[in-house]
Amino acid sequence: MTDNQKTLKKEYIFEGKGLHSGLKVKMTVAPAPAGTGIRFVREDLGPDAVIEALADYVTTTQRGTTLEKGEVRISTLEHLLSALTGMGVDNALVTINAPEVPILDGSALPYVTAIGADGLLDQGVPRAYYDIPETVHYRDSETGSEITICPADEFSADLTVDFNSHVLGVQKIHFDSNTDYASEVAPCRTFVFFHELEFLFRNNLIKGGDLENAIVIVERPVQEETLARMAALFNVEKVDVLPSGYLDNVKLHFPDECGRHKMLDLIGDLTLVGARIKGRVVADKSGHRINTTVARIVREMMKKQ
């Protein structure tokens, strides 16, 4: 198969709730001409309310990645971007009627399942790559997170997750051209620590969260009344803590599913470079803030060449 730009063969419609806004969302992901990249249209604001999926427009990165261009705002888009990149989509038009992409099951699997059933359209135009010319290194002094990208012939990533958690431990994930994104990365759901949940609720976040779209890590002992209060918040009868240290709402797809989800996020956020990277990425304790900061650094390097 030639290494050309690719788009979708047809439109796909996804409906669900925004994780943080709780809004009901309808989103259509459609084919786009070669050279378009990935663009969002906020149809609730009008046909000209367009924003490109580029690091230039990143604003906030609290619990997800948000882009803003004028009055156009799109948040929690990293799972969709990851799915498109992971499946080999270069050009797509995403039409959405709300400011937040639906969380669906908390992973990229719903997108991959839909797209994978039909395959992609080869557009006959060479794919855009950016060869990292020299080592890029960035460290976030506040969080201790670090990302390094070294020149290489193809994209690969090595990611380490370390929350100083006795439940998660240290998880190390590798991704390269031999990794099957659809089966090894896409199914991995977002995660949250139990002790963060009430804080997030109080701060008007995760209004669209439920116990079907997140892995909940229970790092500390929890009283029965606290579990009962959390069950009421999520509108379920009861929740319990498993001996492994996870809430019993979901069954893990992989022992290192949380680390794999961080790889999913990294791939999605690096999509904001606007071209596929040829380089080896080493990410330690990465998150949306450092991912998008590095995407912006690489994008600025591209503009200067």
Image: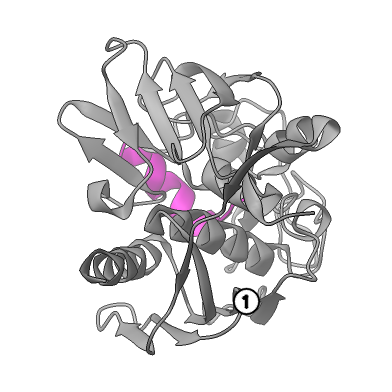
Q: Is residue 37 left or right of residue 83?
A: left
Q: Write the start and end of the magenta stretch as one range.
A: 190-204
Can you see residue 99? Answer: yes
Using a 10 Å C-alpha cutoff, classify the residue at mark 1 as few (fewer than 14 neighbours), some (14 to 19) or many (20 or more). Answer: many
Q: Main secondary structure of the magenta part?
A: helix
Instruction: Decide: is 164 above or below 112.
Output: below
> Coloring scheme of the render?
one colour
- The residue positioned 29% from the left and 79% from the top of the image is 140
Q: Which residue is mark 1?
A: 156
Is residue 224 or residue 128 the one in the foreground?
128
Secondary structure state at the residue bearing disc 1: strand
Instruction: Decide: is 43 above or below 144.
Output: above
Residue 193 within the magenta-colored segment of the rendering: yes
Q: Position of residue 69 (x, y in %)?
A: 20, 35
Q: Is residue 74 left or right of residue 170?
A: left
Is residue 163 or residue 77 the one in the foreground?
77
Q: Quadrant of the N terminus?
A: bottom right
- The residue positioned 28% from the left and 31% from the top of the image is 73
Number of marks in the rendered image: 1
Q: From this viewpoint, which residue is outermost toward the front?
A: 124
Instruction: Decide: is 268 above or below 221.
Output: above
- The residue positioned 47% from the left and 87% from the top of the image is 150
Can you see residue 59? Answer: no
Residue 99 within the magenta-colored segment of the rendering: no
Q: Position of residue 183 (x, y in %)?
A: 83, 54
Q: Is residue 156 left or right of residue 256?
A: left
Is residue 295 or residue 168 the one in the foreground?
295
Q: Position of residue 72 (x, y in %)?
A: 24, 27
Instruction: Decide: is 156 above or below 94.
Output: below
Q: Amino acid at mark 1?
A: Ser
Q: Is residue 132 left or right of residue 163?
A: left
Tell me the quarter of the picture where residue 301 sits: bottom left
